[in-house]
Image: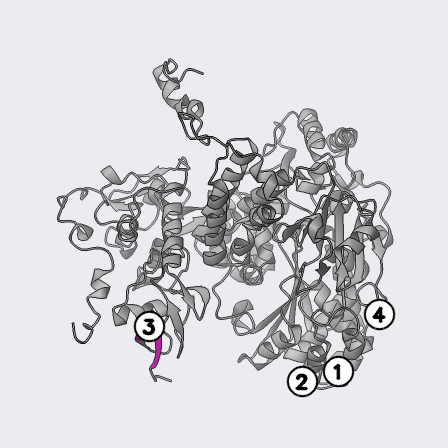
Amino acid sequence: MIEPARDIREICRTHGNDPTRLMDIARAVQGKHGCVSSQALDLIAQAVGIPRVEVESLVSFYTFLSVKPKGNVVIRLCNDVIDEMFGAEQVARAFTEELGIRFGETTPDGKISLEHTPCIGMCDQAPAALINDVVVTYLSSDRAREIVRVLRETGDPRRLVRRLGDGNNAHPLVYSMVHNNIRREGPVVLAPLAPGAALKKALAMSPVEVINGIKTSRLRGRGGAGFPTGMKWEFTRAADGDQKCVLCNADEGEPGTFKDRVILTENPDITFEGMTIAGYAIGAELGIVYLRAEYAYLRAFLESVLQARRARNLLGRNILGKPGVHFDIRIQMGAGAYVCGEETAMISSCEGQRGDPKDRPPFPAQKGYLGMPTTVNNVETFCCVARILDNGPGWFADIGSRGSTGTKLLSVSGDCSSPGVYEVPFGIRLSDLLTMVGAEDAQAVQVGGAAGRMVSPAEFQRTICYDDLATGGSVMVFGPNRNILKVALKFMEFFLEESCGYCTPCRVGTVLMRRKLEEIIEGRGQIGDLEYLQELGSTMILASRCGLGQTAANPVLTTLQAFRPAYEALLRKKTAEPCLASFDIRAALQDAERLAGRSSEIFAG
Amino acid sequence: MSESFLFSIDGIKIEGKPGQTILQAADEAGVYIPRLCAHKDLAPFGACRVCTVMVNGRPQAACTTPAAKGMVVENETEALKKHRCSLVEMLFVEGNHYCMFCEKSGNCELQATAYRLGILAPRYPYQFPRQDVDASHPDVWIDRNRCILCGRCVLASRDLDGKHVFQFVGRSTDKKIWVNAEAHLADTNLGGADKAVDICPVGAILRKRVGYTVPVGQRLYDIKPIGSDIEARRPAAPGR
């Protein structure tokens, strides 16, 4: 039995009693003690020298941290739209029956907690769940019951791993049943690259030449926003600051995206090589990979890859013998918050704070992590960087389309015969992609995740690129029998839960929009409601503080555009009812009736 | 560095100084931009978004965006007014705002802003959240029903009082103002004279035993609409 107080102080000490490492401290305490208890809040606050409420603020923000005790084993069943299409609700029922608890509860013996979680990056092998750090895939009700039996007998989630996945999923440090499902390998991201090959070429050039090469390649950010990478680096290099930082966004949280998981499993060296090149180009010695908590099972493996790179002098001091070139990478674990994929929220999180986005300006390139000029790029962007240095900017720019050079790694899931990862040149027609993945009968395709757009067959001739259908990688296919409005509702629920709550339009707008959409789906919508949704959405877009809020209305706005008849068919035509259709008089009277001890005579049920 | 520069708001020439936000420069020039979380003694926070203006055609929060030479800012347009009404209505329905018997009535910035924008009743459905009241402290109480999560008390306690009495916990709809103690305001080092107490724009942090002392008709915003103090700074237009 560990003495908690002493252990918590020790955890703080091993992190240098450094408040900027609060994420790591809180994660470590949560991992060892099952919660960051009220006592732990005090101990941590004392040790790192910040007010208790600041620690509580952070802990209460992230879903993988909690003040209340949780079981030694936490089952987090993914309930995103794709998982539910493939039976997550039946799996959920099996878990609740077998455990005898509801979601959000812990078994009476305090051993197992059951929770829902948004997309864990396993849509191509859904339904899936996280059990502590262990991923279990292709779930069924039977499998759920078996999982509970094994956990009850052994208490060890690693015992649940059977039939290891392909490639590095079977590596002893990964030891996972996750499958890569690589369906199409392209020349940029998923092709092999000898560690150090691209870096050697970069170090033979000046940093400015490296940046110019990236600009010549016309590489744009792979996270979805598509900002020109070379320009971002140029700004970061030019910004004042003794120290600079390279931040790799591996917080792949956009529903339906899992391509970074595959890159980090099979090709992490390319990512780290790209980061090192970025460090050389902008003059940074510090690199951070922000890895989402859901991918914690990859951490030991990634650490070993970093260690091997240090051993080969691809990281560390005087890299590859070049005097003055120093760069190293640390992994910052997230703790369950979609908004941390937003670059300024990610920086807040790395600094040991709530994942609240920051105001811009200053942009991260001017003032980012701990005030250092910081370039934040996606995992895949760094892969492109390394390949561009190895094969040349011209080679890269010849692939893809004029405004969108290179290839794009797509995560395809939903109603298709071959879900998985596809590396395709930019500019591919959506219809061609659908043929490739075996989804010719698609009724709708969500491109770009929950924040992206719903595309109807009328638009299947459009192309995937920054100037047409932009995506960070998520492509979700919905077959003929799916209810598109219910899909939109799932996405709205996702945004509602993942809003950081900082600004009004996102925090309240998501609630109002979800509610109205639900009313319409339930047949309580009226003429005028579609305009209501549109106006509400326009305020969210205009006034929200960050990209999450600015895109949170997209599920409704884009389905309204592409599937308006589906909405209109549900609206009540007449408004002659005594009450607003959206108003439930019976529900409104409940409290009063309970207090009065009798039911309303006028509005009897 | 200290050279001032010119930019415009709704065609009015405004003098800005380096380091000033659009809102600060506008305030000095006597141009009122509606706001709820911004406060002259506090760092910009950018939470309520009511001060959203169009800057060179793009929406920006006036409270957090630095003013710059030649900027073209739109403030009082029909479109922006509509969005501001939406935001204020959102704040009303998100909480439980019982204006008719709230002791902050007449001195409440949320209420006064709603009046100024011409809001009669919110178009949105009330959420009726269940919120806690903390009356543990001898001199001050918190009513989270009326909190608009503006962050003023957080910043004021930290930056003006040199304490850390308030901070937010939770996220999304669970986000709420919390205190630097296990649960109660009484267990913090909040003093009755703290600036954080009086800086609340609404009736969420209130001083005890002083409610309703000013009769209706004589309260701050009974006399003049919110923003008139700022507008009074504006030099009269020539020829008027």
Q: Position of residue A111 (x, y in %)?
A: 65, 33
Identify residue for label 1. Answer: A203
Subunit ID for the residue under disc 4: A
Three-letter amino acid code of the residue under disc 1: Leu
Direction from residue A508 to residue A429 in the image, left or right: right
Give the label, 4 or 1, closer to the camera. 4
How crowded pointer 1 is (Cα within 10 Å; few <14, some 14-19, many 20+) is rated as some
The region drawn magenta spans B5-13
Residue under the point 77% across and 63% down: A268
Which residue corresponds to mark 2?
A208
Residue drawn at the location 26% of the way across and 41% of the way down: B99
Task: Tell me residue B239's x, y (percent).
Answer: 16, 75
Residue position for label 4: A193
Confirm whether residue A491 shows in the render.
yes
* Distance from Cα at disc 3 to Cα at disc 4: 58 Å
Mark 4 residue crowding within 10 angstroms, few (<14) / some (14–19) / many (20+): some
Query: Which label's residue is closer to the chain start, 4 or 2?
Result: 4
- Mark 3 lies on a secondary structure that is loop
Residue A36 spot, x, y in % from top left: 55, 45
Residue type for callout 4? Leu
Q: Earlier in the sequence, mark 4 or mark 1?
A: 4
**Foreground: B238 or B90?**
B238
Residue beneath label 3, please? B11
Does residue A300 appear in the picture of this structure? no
Q: Residues within 10 Å of mark 2 (few under 14, many from 20)?
A: some
Q: Chain of mark 1?
A: A
- Asked if labels 4 and 2 share a chain, the reply is yes
The verdict on residue A499 being magenta is no
